[in-house]
Structure formats: structure tokens, C-alpha cells
Image: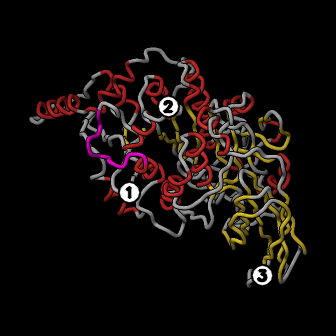
Amino acid sequence: MKRRDFLRNLAPAGVVFPALINGLTFKAFAESPLISALTQAETDTDHVLVLIQLNGGNDGLNTVIPFDQFENLSNARSNIILPQNKILKLRGTSFTGLHPSMTGLQTLFNEEKLQIIQSVGYPQPNFSHFRATDIWMSASDSNKYVNSGWAGRYLAEEYTGYPTDYPNSVTPDPLAIQIGSFISPAMQGPSVNMGMAITDPVNFYNLINGIQGPSPNTRGGKELTYIRQVAQQTQQYGDAIKKAAGKVTNQFSGYPTSNPLANQLKIVARLIAGGLKTRIYMVSLGGFDTHAQQVVASAKETGTHARLLQRVSEGIKAFMDDLTYLNAHKRVIGMTFSEFGRRIKSNGSGGTDHGAAAPLFVFGHYAQTDILGNNPEIPLIASASDNIPMQFDFRSVYASILKQWFCVPNTILNNVMLKDFQNIQVIKNSAPCISSNPDIFPTIETTLVLTNYPNPFQQATTLSYQTMGGHTLIQIFSTEGKLIKSLLDKEVSPGNHKISFENEGYPPGIYYARLQNNNQQITRTMLLGR
């Protein structure tokens, strides 16, 4: 979606009520037909998705650290590399660790409540903050502009009559809530926005406690006070939020202080436990554009990025503990994402520049507990343009959550995601939504195999691969993370197959072949000689 189109669509979208709290507009966009479908469905449909946006482009290689690539990583990042003995170990693996400040997520992983998905991105990555964010929000190809968001399309598919006659007695609550100054483009439906924004935690507590911000001491002060009172009295969604919040009088006491992400998540936990029927929440934390002074030179496990990761880790851990305390933990799945990662090689300013793929976290009681994918391969000598090659398309993650957590059928899923994306296992099979649909995700019994010969090659190389059958994808990427060619994207029979990759004038160097079949994927390094 182009910036001007988003701003134009945002203003009239949805049902807007001007709850002028502390002088800031509180916009609510009524429930779409999704709420009716979810609340009236025969299956357990009280599931909630919490999205955590890390604004600025998170440095994945300083977040999830590949122990087996540590020497090469040290060569590429000598001025910011973490002390190896301080990297946090994860149960069940000796190859992958977490940044030293992420003890909360380490605990969740060891408690089987956290999944790490390696090298998540998309073909032809864009390194502009706004455009890259737009791609993640819209779930579009990077060369296409789409005037809707993936979550908004999901809601619109389920609530075809929205916004007419909403809210109502069956669907009294907002479908999607963003803690922030404006509605995320992800919530934009094909015609109207399906979300609601709470500008900040202060305004939330003012709303539920009936506190008005002080009016200015001017001739218009009394009139402003009156407008605020009328607005608060007439906002139906505000009443629903206050009712839900009022049901929770005691929360987990271990939330960290001076942590803006934790403050937002504390509100989300209260609304979920209070029975609000909202299905999607989005919160955010900024500051991840770490071009310079990412670490403290004398103690590289500290600094700007360490503080940000600590806020993420502590905020999520407290949120999970709070949900358990409030007995709402089985209803929630959360996911982190950032608009892009950072380059393999650090820069001369003690930071990292815009890159391609990066890991993300899926957390929750029913989150699949594993490290999905392989540690990214770090070249012996990394150039300034080298990127982490994509292992998983972020749209596969979206599609998998929608299918496995919200039970979205394939016919609707393809409309929401704009095309067919392979499912990867992000939700445990014991989750209520998919336990009654065992065909959603097959049991994995085989391991993928991908080789090529000759390697190095000049004119062509033959890729030999083994699959379990079904939807199979083979792509070729450059070291910059750009998609060079899709060799295969179709249903294949189980067994061994071959396919040729021809040199069509590509520059010599390292390329990555990526094979994805169902929830498994594997990459292969290939060398194109002169």
C-alpha cells in the first residue's frame, strides 16, 4: 500500500468515535463479521493472537546466535560480537543461543512455551523502513502495492456485513486493538479498517477509571470538557473495554518498570482475562534501527540493542506469567516481527545496516517448541552487502497461524494471503483448534535432502532432492537475500527428484538453493565459478 493511499483509507475507515482523552483521539473500528463466526463456531474459538512489532529492523544475528558459525561471525563483526561465554544456552541444542539479556525468553524456551523460526523474510527484500513495514503488514509481494492488510482481509472474510449494524448484542467488542497512535495497516480491510487504537497506556487507565485530562484554562475549556464527557458517554466500545478491564482487579506483580512494551502487554493481558472478545492485539517497541553504537565497546553484551532485547524478553515473560496467573494462558499465541533484519557484517560505527531475513519468536502455551530451520550460514569472509538468505517466507508463518490457531479453511486462507503458502508447524498438535482437524498438519517421518552436482559449477548444476510429497518449493537466492529464480513451486510425488539450475548470465559467487516441503526446509550453498 502506498503511503498516500494508506492515509486516505485510514481517515474514514470503520466506525470512529472521538473519545478525546487527554486531548488525544481514541479511534475504534467496530467488529467485523469475524467475531460472529468465531463466537458462534462449534469449535473452541476463544483464541487470541498478540503481535509484537519491533520497529526499525532487529539485528537477528545479535538476538539468536549461531554457535556453530561463531568464528566466522566474529570475523564479520569483530567490533560488536558478543562474548561467547555469556551467550545463553537453550535446552536441547548446543548450536544456537540467545543474547545474554534475554533470560526471560530462555526460560520460556526451556519451559516449552517458545518457538524460534530462523531466517524469516520474503523474496526480493526491500530495505526502506516504510515500504518493508508495508510489505509485512499487507503480506503482498515486494513489487506489488495492496490497499489492505492481511489481518483486515481475514476479518473481512469472516464478517462480510461490517461495518453495518456493528457493534451489536452478539458482537459487542472490538475485533482488533492496537496500542499506539494509529491503526496498523495490517488491520485495513478491503474497504474499511477493522481495528481500534488506544493511543497509550495512560489514556487506557484514564478511560477505565473515568478520569478526564485537565482542560486548558481558556474560554473553550468548559466546552472541551463537555465534549469529552459526551464522547466518553456515547462510545460503545469504550464501555465494553471498561467492563472487561473492570473484571480484573489483580494482576501478576512481576511486570518490569520503565518498560514500555511490558506496559502495553499488561493492558492486553487484562482485557483478555476480562473476557473481551477481541481476537487480535498489536503492540510495538521502537529503536531497533541500530546503525551506530549498537553495543558498548568495553562490554559488548550491553548497550542499546541489549536494552531493547531485555525489554522484549522481560515484557513477554511477564505477560506469559500474568496470563497464567489470570488463567488465560491457553487462549493466547504471540509472535514478534520486525520489518527486516541487519547485514551479516557490522559497519565502522559500531552498528549494523539494513538487511534481509531474521529470526522471529512464536510464544504461548500451545506454541510449538523447537528451533525451526537451520542456523544461517556465515561466510568465511563476509562483504558489506552480504545478507542472511531466507529460509521461511513470513507469509507462511501468518498462514500457518491462521490455519492452525483460528481454523481458517484453505478456501478462505488463499483469499486472505493472496496466494497459497506452505504451512509450517507453529502450534502444538494438542491445541484445541487443530486437534479435531488432524489432517491440517501431517506427521513428519522423513528428512529432506538437497544436494547439487557439480559444485562449483559454471554453465549448470543439477539439484537432487528428496521430499515427502505434496507442495514443494525450490528457490535460488543471492548472498544479498534476493530471489534469483524459482525452479519449482507445485505438488510433487514422494521420493527422489532432480531439477536443473542453468546459469543465465548470473555473476560468479555464492548462491543458496532453498527447498521447502510442508513444514520442513533446507538450504544448500552453491558456488558459481567464472
Alpha carbon separation for disc pair 2 and 1:
25 Å
Task: Classify mark 2: residues with Cα within 10 Å, few (<14), some (14-19) or many (20+).
Answer: many
Q: Marks 3 and 1, Cα distance to the nearest angstrom?
A: 41 Å
Relative to 441, is 316 on the left or the right?
Answer: left
Give the residue number, with chain letter if any, for mark 1: 190
Q: Residue at x 59, y 32 (%)?
A: 316
Q: Amino acid at mark 3?
A: Asn
Instruction: Name the main secondary structure of what is drawn in magenta.
Output: loop
Residue 476, image x, y percentages: 73, 69
Q: Against 132, is 233 above or below?
A: above
Residue 475: quarter of image:
bottom right
- Report the side of 267 relative to 484 (left or right): left
167 within the magenta span:
yes
Q: Is residue 407 visible?
A: yes
Q: What residue appears at the point 61 percent right and 49 percent down from the top-left corner?
A: 397
The residue at which mark 3 appears reads as 503
The image quadrant of residue 494 is bottom right
Q: Please give the range of residues in magenta.
A: 158-168
Residue highlighted by disc 2: 46
The C terminus sits in image quarter: bottom right
User: Looking at numbered disc 2 in the image, what kind of residue is underneath it?
Assistant: Asp
Q: Is residue 307 left or right of residue 146?
A: right
Sooner in the amino-acid sequence: mark 2 or mark 1 = 2
Q: CA distance from mark 3 to mark 2?
A: 51 Å
Residue 206's spot in the image, x, y percent?
Answer: 32, 26
